[in-house]
């Protein structure tokens, strides 16, 4: 292994056989009055897979950003293989043998795999020798770690799972002995996630050290050797995975017992609320995103739609919510909706009893620089209930309504005057849910309801969705989390490439079958 000395040159450091791969001692980091990390100490054994879990805002990302050189700790020490190092930027982290695979990949989409792998790590001014050397090494790494990827393929032509392999190859090409993976399965099918786990196990067996940041307790239990739990900027526990349970880890994360399953009674479906027939959508580039969608959601039921991101779920929500035009037939409570004219907008949909929790709360659900009470009225500002006159809104009434909603939905802190950006991801999501659910919709469109949300908030959000169903409302749920789809839904529809691959009852299917359908494999193909 090598690190940079004071002159910036590479200096070889002999690893200490008995020392941990990583040891953090007394790490503290504050951002103004917010103490993100407080006196954190952690030891990660060589050749192990070490999980780190915690609620949003627990300090996981800050700690890893310090280790990878994005932030500098206010206090504490970092030891790699028993040797103290100072990591002030990502280049020094790479020189110390650390690689990071981010949740949102850092790839140039119109470059090839080979070009992406060597980007920033070229041997000299001439690119051709670097490419030749990289091609040879890439094949060795691919064969050794089951990371098979075509070196000449364009990134934009690869599946998400293969793009993730490219990120891992980038780190290995830079001779990383320690890999940090941040929420690595968020956009993978179950089959791709299983393959990733086999890759990680292979890397571990070859002596690599893996740090896995995830909020999925199932993954922690399945793949890690050791798990550390963070809460409110502090390290609360480190345990051997085989000696703990999901229930114990959840309690350590939030400081109370958490119900890990969705507690709901069987659905009592009523009449159809929304009916969709032969729905098609063509985007601005002329690409057909929806290809003849037929579905129905009834009163008092949750229809779950699963699929790998980018297979038409977003477009389905947007056309139903009035943000995108389409062709076909949509009937809401028996009345047909205009999909192309002046009535195809969010305001007209809300007037018909459709509420929409968008998939991306930052880009579509909130204006982060605006206060909570302002966000709580967005989309409903024409409601006569909150108008003083033709020119002015009843701001005092809106603030009072916001306070009631924040208390009901357990938004913390319950301060209507706080800017949306000042809330954690889970509390931002609660603000959006409160705004839409409190309008008493006939149909709730909800996309990725618990994306980036910690386990305590997940439990609460699930309870609110089920309560709305039990009031006789129709719910159309889109999620990439199969355990969420299976536990919340009364019926499940699988989408692939803009089409519906099939429908299942949760009691009659499993993640394996749904995963095959998400990959485009039909019943007929499975039988062959």
Image (cartoon, rainbow, N blue to C red):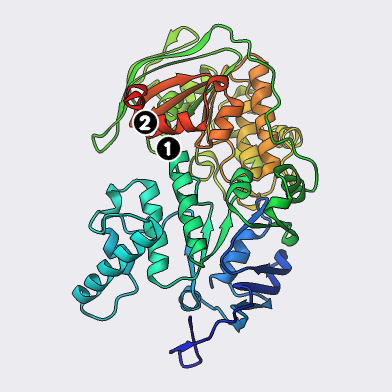
- 2 or 1: tag closer to the N-terminus: 1
Residues 138 and 501: in front is 138
Residues 374 and 239: in front is 239
Q: Residue at x 25, y 67 (%)?
A: 135
Element assignment for label 2:
strand
- The image shows residue 246 at horizontal and vertical percentages of 70, 44
In the image as oriented, which residue stretches furthest toward the bottom?
7
Question: Disc 1 marks which residue?
Answer: 308
Decide if residue 390 is in sight here.
no
CA neighbours of label 1 inside 10 A, class few (<14), some (14 to 19), many (20+): many
Q: Is residue 512 above or below residue 383?
A: below
| Numbered marks: total | 2
- Label number found at residue 30: none
Q: Residue at x 54, y 31 (%)?
A: 379
In the rendered view, does 31 fall on the left or right side of 65?
Answer: right
Q: Do the residues under discs 2 and 1 have CB atoms within 8 angstroms?
A: yes
Q: Residue at x 58, y 63 (%)?
A: 48
Element assignment for label 1:
loop
In the image as oriented, which residue stretches furthest toward the right?
256
- The image shows residue 437 at horizontal and vertical percentages of 63, 26
Task: Indicate the quadrant where residue 175 lies.
Answer: bottom left
Question: Disc 2 marks which residue?
Answer: 496
**Alpha carbons under labels 2 and 1: distance apart:** 8 Å
Q: Is residue 51 above or below residue 123?
A: above
Residues 493 and 22: in front is 22
Decide if residue 21 is in sight here.
yes
- The image shows residue 171 at horizontal and vertical percentages of 42, 66
């Amino acid at each position: 292994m090598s690190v940079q000395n004071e002159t910036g040159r590479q200096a070889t450091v002999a690893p200490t056989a008995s020392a941990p791969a990583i040891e953090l001692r007394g790490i503290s980091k504050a951002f103004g009055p917010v103490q993100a990390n407080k006196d954190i100490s952690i030891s990660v054994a060589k050749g192990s897979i070490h999980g780190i879990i915690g609620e949003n805002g627990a300090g996981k990302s800050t700690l890893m950003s310090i280790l990878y050189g994005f932030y500098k700790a206010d206090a504490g020490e970092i030891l790699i293989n028993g040797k103290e190092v100072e990591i002030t930027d990502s280049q020094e982290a790479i020189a110390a043998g650390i690689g990071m695979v981010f949740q949102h990949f850092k790839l140039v989409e119109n470059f090839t795999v080979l070009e992406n792998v060597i980007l920033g790590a070229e041997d000299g001014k001439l690119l051709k020798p670097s490419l030749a050397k990289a091609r040879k090494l890439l094949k060795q790494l691919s064969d050794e770690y089951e990371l098979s990827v075509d070196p000449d393929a364009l990134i934009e032509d690869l599946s998400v799972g293969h793009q993730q392999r490219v990120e891992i190859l980038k780190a290995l090409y830079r001779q990383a002995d320690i890999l940090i993976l941040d929420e690595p399965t968020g956009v993978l099918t179950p089959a791709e996630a299983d393959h990733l786990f086999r890759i990680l196990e292979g890397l571990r067996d070859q002596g690599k050290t893996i740090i896995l940041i995830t909020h999925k307790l199932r993954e922690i239990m399945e793949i890690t050797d050791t798990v550390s739990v963070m809460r409110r900027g502090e390290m609360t526990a480190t345990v051997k995975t085989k000696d703990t349970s999901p229930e114990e880890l959840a309690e350590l994360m939030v400081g109370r017992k958490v119900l890990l399953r969705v507690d709901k009674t069987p659905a009592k479906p009523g009449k159809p609320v929304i009916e969709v027939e032969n729905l098609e959508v063509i985007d601005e580039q002329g690409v057909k995103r929806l290809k003849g969608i037929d579905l129905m959601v009834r009163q008092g039921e949750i229809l779950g739609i699963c699929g790998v991101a980018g297979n038409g779920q977003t477009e389905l929500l947007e056309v139903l919510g009035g943000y995108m035009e389409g062709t076909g037939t949509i009937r809401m409570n028996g009345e047909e909706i205009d999909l192309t004219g002046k009535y195809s907008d969010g305001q007209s949909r809300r007037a018909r009893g459709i509420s929409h929790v968008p998939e991306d709360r930052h880009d579509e659900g909130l204006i982060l620089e605006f206060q909570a009470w302002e966000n709580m009225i967005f989309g409903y500002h024409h409601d006569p209930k909150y108008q003083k006159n033709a020119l002015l809104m009843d701001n005092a009434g809106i603030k009072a309504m916001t306070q009631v909603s924040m208390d009901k939905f357990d938004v913390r802190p319950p301060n209507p005057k706080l800017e949306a950006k000042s809330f954690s991801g889970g509390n931002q999501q609660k603000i959006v849910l409160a705004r839409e659910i409190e309008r008493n919709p006939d149909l709730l469109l909800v996309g990725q309801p618990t994306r980036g949300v910690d386990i305590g908030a997940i439990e609460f959000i699930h309870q609110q969705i089920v309560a709305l169903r039990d009031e006789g409302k129709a719910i159309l749920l889109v999620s990439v989390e199969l355990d969420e789809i299976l536990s919340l839904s009364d019926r499940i529809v699988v989408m692939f490439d803009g089409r519906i691959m099939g429908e299942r009852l949760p009691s009659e299917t499993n993640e394996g079958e749904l995963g095959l359908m998400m990959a485009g494999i039909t019943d007929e193909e499975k039988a062959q």
